[in-house]
Image (cartoon, coloured by chain):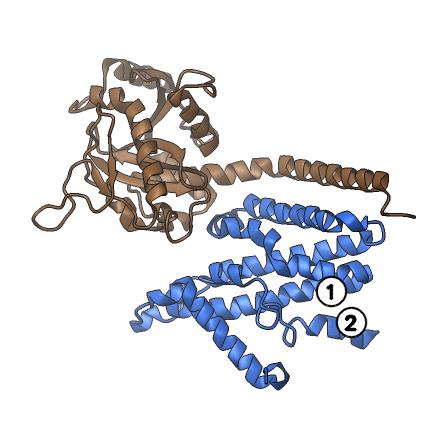
């Protein structure tokens, strides 16, 4: 048989590609449930890290099931808000049907916040309140090579940050990847004060954030950028500004309040009645 | 025939090792050897990809149109790499390692060992020897990875497979060992040792 015939070549490559594509689609579909479960546990451990329930390494020693247990145990309430800071709906916090926002969902909401051609609906922003009083909100944006995302936690009813955890898809190892791999970078956010209401909620600055007399970073909204990773730092800065900007009204409404708003209180009562 | 088969298996492990003699796959061997666990998963992935792609392409070798053979090889290798990546992502035990290895699993596609062995061996040999050749080359690559990772994890973190070995004696982990350049230094040492044992590799 003449394998150098044009028709044969075209048919051969077509058949090979179709077979491979079908096989990969089948495998991807059949493994999807397991991969989603792993991703969910990973998301949960990132949120717990941000809310200071332990370092990422400590939490990673727990298995998937233990991570879900810990989350279900420690979560106080989780709900979705709109840009005005009003609660739209509650998120399920029962152990078996935990609702968290995967990076894929964050991507969709990122388009909704930014508007433009990719906007599909009004933004629905998740808020996770843990029993230690910390409020965790996600951020999402573009790094240098691919998406970056993360979770920032705030002290109870305040604009002081309690922790942060960032993750990325394909930033450069040793440079941009430090947003995830370097705990000291994430620690810089602790104690910094977000400037809600301005367009620069958090500033990631080159050349060093202002220091106080003891050489510690001042408790303002400025954080040191990562040397050699200007693009990733800028991407993270933009992602934080976009997302915390979208959360601004919620945080401004709650700032300094001891109790939640009347609406939330109402929901609490309802839940209690159901439990009874 | 038997002796030839034995040669196919043993040659890539030592005498014709893909990393130290052919100097292929250097990039990934610097990147994934910080921990033994990562190196082991990477080594097994390369063995699987290399072995099975060689087997598939050897089975197809008489039907592949000559002009598009590289593309056909690429499609098969890419398929195997994606399969391995998907499987690693699916298991709880390997998910964290897959995240840690991140792009390097996907970059097995560009590992010269895989395409090199297919082009040089699998397209001209029967399926069984091709499969063994692929596995043996993957194993030769994996062996060097594990040697490098052994020293890097022991000296860089004081642990082996995450189990504390040196730290309990007050050892302070050496950060230089964690950085990629040290892997290159270690690789150089391995090449040095191999060439002093195997005199015919020394250039006059």
Looking at marks 2 and 1 on the same chain, the residue that comes earlier in the sequence is marked by 2
Name above or below for residue A51 compared with residue A129: below
Position of residue A126 measured from the top left corner of the image (x, y, whole percent): 37, 25
- Rendered residue at 32%/41% (across/down): A233
Whether residue A86 sits left or right of residue A193 in the image: it is right
User: What is the secondary structure assignment of the residue under circle 2?
Assistant: helix
User: What is the secondary structure assignment of the residue under circle 1?
Assistant: helix
- Asked if one can make out residue A99 in the rendered structure from this viewpoint, the answer is no
Give the numbered dot on residue B42: none
Whether residue A160 sits left or right of residue B3 in the image: it is left
Marks 2,1: beta carbons within 8 A: yes
Disc 1 target residue: B132
Position of residue A64 measured from the top left corner of the image (x, y, whole percent): 47, 43
| Crowd rating for badge 2 (residues with CA inside 10 Å; few <14, some 14–19, many 20+) | some
Using the numbered discs, state the Cα–Cα distance from disc 2 to disc 1 in whole angstroms.
8 Å
Q: Chain in brown?
A: A
Position of residue A207 measured from the top left corner of the image (x, y, whole percent): 22, 47
Give the numbered dot on residue B5: 2
Q: Chain of mark 2?
A: B
From the image, state the color of chain B: blue
Q: Quadrant of residue A218?
A: top left
Q: Chain of mark 1?
A: B
Q: How many marks?
A: 2
Which residue occupies the foreground of this view, B98 or B68?
A: B68
- Asked if one can make out residue A63 in the rendered structure from this viewpoint, the answer is yes
Which residue occupies the foreground of this view, B120 or A88?
A: B120
Whether residue B114 sits left or right of residue A109 in the image: it is right
């Amino acid at each position: 048989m003449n394998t150098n015939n044009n028709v044969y070549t075209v048919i051969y490559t077509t058949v090979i590609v179709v077979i491979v594509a079908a096989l990969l689609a089948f495998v991807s579909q059949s493994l999807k449930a397991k991969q989603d479960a792993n991703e969910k546990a990973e998301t949960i451990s990132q949120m717990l890290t941000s809310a200071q329930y332990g370092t990422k390494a400590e939490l990673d020693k727990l298995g998937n099931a233990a991570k879900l247990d810990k989350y279900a145990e420690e979560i106080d309430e989780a709900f979705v808000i709109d840009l005005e800071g009003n609660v739209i709906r509650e998120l399920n916090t029962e152990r078996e049907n935990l609702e968290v926002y995967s990076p894929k969902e964050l991507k969709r909401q990122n388009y909704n916040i930014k508007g433009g051609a990719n906007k599909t609906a009004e933004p629905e922003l998740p808020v996770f309140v843990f029993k230690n009083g910390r409020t965790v909100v996600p951020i999402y944006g573009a790094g240098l090579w691919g998406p970056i995302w993360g979770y920032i936690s705030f002290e109870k009813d305040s604009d002081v940050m309690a922790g942060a955890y960032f993750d990325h898809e394909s930033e450069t190892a040793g440079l941009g990847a430090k947003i995830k791999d370097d705990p000291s970078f994430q620690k810089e956010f602790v104690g910094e004060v977000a400037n809600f209401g301005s367009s620069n909620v958090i500033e990631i600055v080159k050349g060093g954030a202002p220091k106080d007399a003891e050489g510690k970073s001042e408790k303002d909204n400025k954080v040191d950028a990562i040397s050699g990773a200007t693009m990733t730092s800028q991407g993270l800065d933009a992602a934080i500004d976009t997302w915390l900007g979208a959360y601004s009204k919620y945080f401004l409404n709650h700032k300094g309040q001891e109790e939640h708003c009347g609406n939330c209180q109402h929901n609490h009562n309802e839940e209690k009645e159901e439990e009874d | 025939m038997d002796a030839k088969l034995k040669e196919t298996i043993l040659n890539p492990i030592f005498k014709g090792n893909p990393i130290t003699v052919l100097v292929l796959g250097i990039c990934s061997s610097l990147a994934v050897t910080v921990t033994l666990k990562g190196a082991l998963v990477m080594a097994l992935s390369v063995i699987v990809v290399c072995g099975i792609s060689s087997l598939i392409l050897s089975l197809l070798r008489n039907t592949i149109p000559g002009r598009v053979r590289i593309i056909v090889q690429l499609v098969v290798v890419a398929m195997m790499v994606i399969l391995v990546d998907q499987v690693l992502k699916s298991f709880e035990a390997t998910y964290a390692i897959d995240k840690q290895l991140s792009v390097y699993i996907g970059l097995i596609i560009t590992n010269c060992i895989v395409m090199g062995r297919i082009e040089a061996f699998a397209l001209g040999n029967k399926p069984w020897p091709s499969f063994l050749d692929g596995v043996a080359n993957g194993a030769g690559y994996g062996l060097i990875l594990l040697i490098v990772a052994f020293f890097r994890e022991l000296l860089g973190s004081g642990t082996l497979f995450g189990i504390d070995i040196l730290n309990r004696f007050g050892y302070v982990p050496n950060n230089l060992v964690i950085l990629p350049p040290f892997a290159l230094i270690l690789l150089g040492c391995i090449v040095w040792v191999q060439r002093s044992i195997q005199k015919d590799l020394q250039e006059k």
